[in-house]
Image (cartoon, coloured by chain):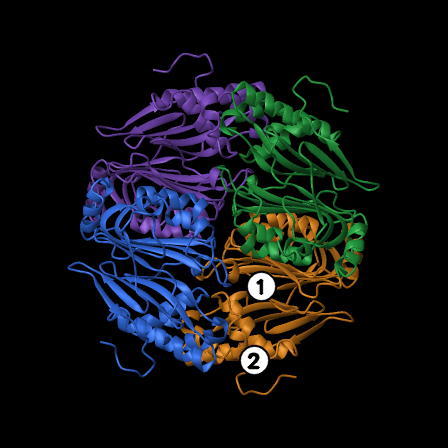
Chain colours: A orange, B blue, C purple, D green
Amino acid sequence: MCRWIAYSGTPILLSQVLFRPEHSLIDQSLHSRLGVETTNGDGFGIGWYPGDTDTDTPAVLRDVGPAWNNRNLLEVAHHVRSGLFFAHIRASTGTAVQQTNCHPFRSGRWMWMHNGMISEFSRLRRDLALAVDPALYAGIEGSTDSELMFFLALTFGLTDDPPGAVARMAGLVETTGQAYGVPHPLQMTVAVTDGVRVWAFRYSSEGRSRSLYYSTRVETLRALHPDASFLRDVSDDTRLVVSEPLGTLPGAWNEVPESSHGIIQPGGDELHAFRPVPPGGPRPN
Amino acid sequence: MCRWIAYSGTPILLSQVLFRPEHSLIDQSLHSRLGVETTNGDGFGIGWYPGDTDTDTPAVLRDVGPAWNNRNLLEVAHHVRSGLFFAHIRASTGTAVQQTNCHPFRSGRWMWMHNGMISEFSRLRRDLALAVDPALYAGIEGSTDSELMFFLALTFGLTDDPPGAVARMAGLVETTGQAYGVPHPLQMTVAVTDGVRVWAFRYSSEGRSRSLYYSTRVETLRALHPDASFLRDVSDDTRLVVSEPLGTLPGAWNEVPESSHGIIQPGGDELHAFRPVPPGGPRPN
Amino acid sequence: MCRWIAYSGTPILLSQVLFRPEHSLIDQSLHSRLGVETTNGDGFGIGWYPGDTDTDTPAVLRDVGPAWNNRNLLEVAHHVRSGLFFAHIRASTGTAVQQTNCHPFRSGRWMWMHNGMISEFSRLRRDLALAVDPALYAGIEGSTDSELMFFLALTFGLTDDPPGAVARMAGLVETTGQAYGVPHPLQMTVAVTDGVRVWAFRYSSEGRSRSLYYSTRVETLRALHPDASFLRDVSDDTRLVVSEPLGTLPGAWNEVPESSHGIIQPGGDELHAFRPVPPGGPRPN
Amino acid sequence: MCRWIAYSGTPILLSQVLFRPEHSLIDQSLHSRLGVETTNGDGFGIGWYPGDTDTDTPAVLRDVGPAWNNRNLLEVAHHVRSGLFFAHIRASTGTAVQQTNCHPFRSGRWMWMHNGMISEFSRLRRDLALAVDPALYAGIEGSTDSELMFFLALTFGLTDDPPGAVARMAGLVETTGQAYGVPHPLQMTVAVTDGVRVWAFRYSSEGRSRSLYYSTRVETLRALHPDASFLRDVSDDTRLVVSEPLGTLPGAWNEVPESSHGIIQPGGDELHAFRPVPPGGPRPN
């Protein structure tokens, strides 16, 4: 399907994460190891917060060609630095290869990206679209399940309670899928951010979700690898969440458990269970 | 907005209509004379019927750049011949510049293209989308009013009764617009074809529709311009419908009247009044 | 590097070769088996002769994205038929991903496509460019070794004596490479056509050339596979030359020998040795 | 031809120059007033210095579509700030619409952009290309006169003495053109920068050069327009050089004289005469 990276921590040149690592996202676009498809060449996107006061929205750069040969991506990655950014490479599951189908999606300060799929989306699409808040509906620009999941999460209160909204979105997809007799309606890893915190979700109806990893605490890595100089340049709270590890540094990567979500935030990260909430169901707490 | 051309008649190289005339569609992409915008550089599309028995659908070539510098358009136009083809150049009224927003749109043997707009489309979009036949809904790939008008016409029986279906589509847009307090909801010139006949519509809520012209009968033109050699190469039933005249040959172009639709077909063309039919209203006859 | 296909025979829809086979060129763009790179996603091109009298040049359609997700390629391939066409998918070895670097290249009636490379091309490029006929020089539009090889072959008389011109081109590359101390200057499989005959070359300085196959005679295949119905639809003289086999039909594919070139033509194909002719050297005969 | 803008001064969001002004570069892409072509839709580019210590090269973003509908340009312009940047919109005079033909061109810390043309470039191209330093030749990626002028200027010492190198480049073009009987070989406005200073040139063989303007000193403008609040936000040394004025503020724009070049730099701008230096001619002083 797709591959993605979420970075939070010391402001760095985007290229240090996107191009430099041994198995960088660019390398994954050609040779993904853990993805369903080895090639992720149906568009890409990056979104970053500039970190100054004039602009409170992230910049989002998306294009329809492969990431591996895109010169504008190379330019921006080598000249823009940010302390919070998303990057995504796409392998289409059938929908058109167009900019509005590329991740991350944005709404105000918020960004969203997804790996996975809604099974038999073409059958469920209309019902799901009808559940989108009418005031938001006109903002749908593309034709992917991923964008619609974002609009549903926004409908269910994403900006107030991200885990609750994503749980309700997932619940609606499950319920709608079941109504249409779709065996395993939802497969997802999702990253969401408001520019301060990052929420990452791993879930699938069948309990065999797409791969997702988070990086080990920097202070632990420093103790394990006292010679790794780049670890000295980043702050203790620097963290990555990735579809697949960017390298082979022992001890650096940990699998996000099935049916769970994590929060990367100032003051301490969190890891919780994730369970869809069906329409009309109680809020999770 | 946009400019378009529909050709029906003797099979010719597409370039003879698209590139050769003094004020060809390519010239119109840079310097439209009668359009709302002088530049139509937000994508283009052509659709043609190959005219052999193996393929009963038209080929549709669309791209997001301007028509005037597109080499693939140049190549195809100079090497493909057809007796029935559409061509369209786009000036976006706000929606994304992407292939799925380019005309012509296709469904089976049918093609559709549009110049104009649904006013305040972002407010009406959801209601109109809900009126699309659920079985067709998943086929919506883009975000334009034009594509949605096509899907509504398909919903209302386009393939059985094109004028009736377009009248019901227009009626729904009018009614929906009125419900939202939109002064003049619809502005359109539309061309539709099934590969045999071509229907062309000119209508707007305010009664001041975008320009639309049809070519004079070839036999009449031959009498008027006995020296125009190209008129000898085309059959008597060759006909063009265009957003604006392709040249200045006196007597060659006739304005399609306000609120009317024409049919180009074997056995004799027709011209009729066009009036929207509101939801629940009687079929026009 | 790249993968290519040359077809000559009964006029067919391009899709029957490009999309239909089990291991079609489109499949090879994602999962090449015999290529240096598994992914060939840096642009593509097709060139075909329409087969009517008005147009004596081939149409060439090229684009910069991957072939596997290009809708215009899909459209043209399913609606255009030809008895002689080329198709090429590109994996850049460093030069820009742009239309003018995509194959096939064209000059008048002639088309050229290439898989392979000139080693250390950036060092040899200027000397090779200076050897191009000054009257042709201004026609160079891209930055690839492949296009320059075409212009050199044109300079050396490609349109009069294709094997001789390609031999002199290869000889110049060898000599120039040696002058710069490049170990193995040339690696190539090349296809050339004038719209009637197709010449295919397989050669490399090191004697380990990129893969190249030609299809077995249709009458032989019919005898081997009496149940393969598609073999009944094509004429006896239908022939394919391909970078890698399109399927696994036993007996269908034969390797083009090292350092050789073949000619597909009306009246009987030919296979000959190929040896570069250094500048000032005698014409091969 | 083309239109361009060079900005030097207080670091600002690029959008404040590219999108905000009444007759911004984006507006000029659709409706140029002083250009040879009203539409400049054949690609665009921006180049900016990030202004931090890690990256000493400018970022260059270029794309082949029109600037007016490019979302990535919009995103970058609204989220990136710089104290020295170039922007360019292109109207091709025949060469391919491809990224490598878009301005600005870059070499190390240096950027170059051009409006104008070398007359009958296809005839002069080879001779001019041969004059490029062989060590630089392989870096030529596109097919424009503009890029070749840049490589010639680099050959003639651009990084040591910009006015001298541009004069020698212009002299070579004049001499080469005369040798081929071309009446007025050169037409140019050129901007060059090393990230600290900006050199702007206005020259043409016929003495009727493309338009070029520079902005009035900020302190003077403040006195003229005490109510223009945005003038309070920029430093006294902020300066723009533009193909055509960005607005109608009286007293804000001054024509760069024919056959002259200016230098924008810390410590005081300069304006000098410009005269081509033929090959073998003395250095200007």
Closer-to-camera residue (A74/C235): A74
**x, y percentage for residue D96?**
49, 39
Q: In this view, does B158 lie to the left or right of C104?
A: left
Image quadrant holding the N terminus of chain B, namely bottom left
Q: Is residue D116 left or right of residue B179?
A: right
Q: Is residue D239 left or right of residue A157?
A: right
Task: Categorize mark 2 by other alpha carbons within 10 Å: few (<14), some (14-19), many (20+).
Answer: many
Name the front one of labels 1 and 2: 2
Give me the C-alpha separation between circle 1 and circle 2. Answer: 22 Å
Disc number placed over residue A211 in the picture, else none:
1
Question: Callout 2: helix, strand or loop?
Answer: helix
Image quadrant holding the C terminus of chain B, namely bottom left
**Amino acid on which the number 2 mark rests in the picture:** Arg
Residue at 34 percent of width and 21 percent of height:
C161
**x, y percentage for residue B83?**
24, 51
**x, y percentage for residue A48?**
67, 60
Q: Which of marks 1 and 2 is nearer the N terminus?
A: 2
Q: In this view, does B149 lie above or below D116?
A: below
Disc number placed over residue A168 in the picture, else none:
2
Q: Is residue D122 above or below residue B179?
A: above
Any part of residue D66 in sight: yes
Q: In this view, does D140 lie above or below C40?
A: above
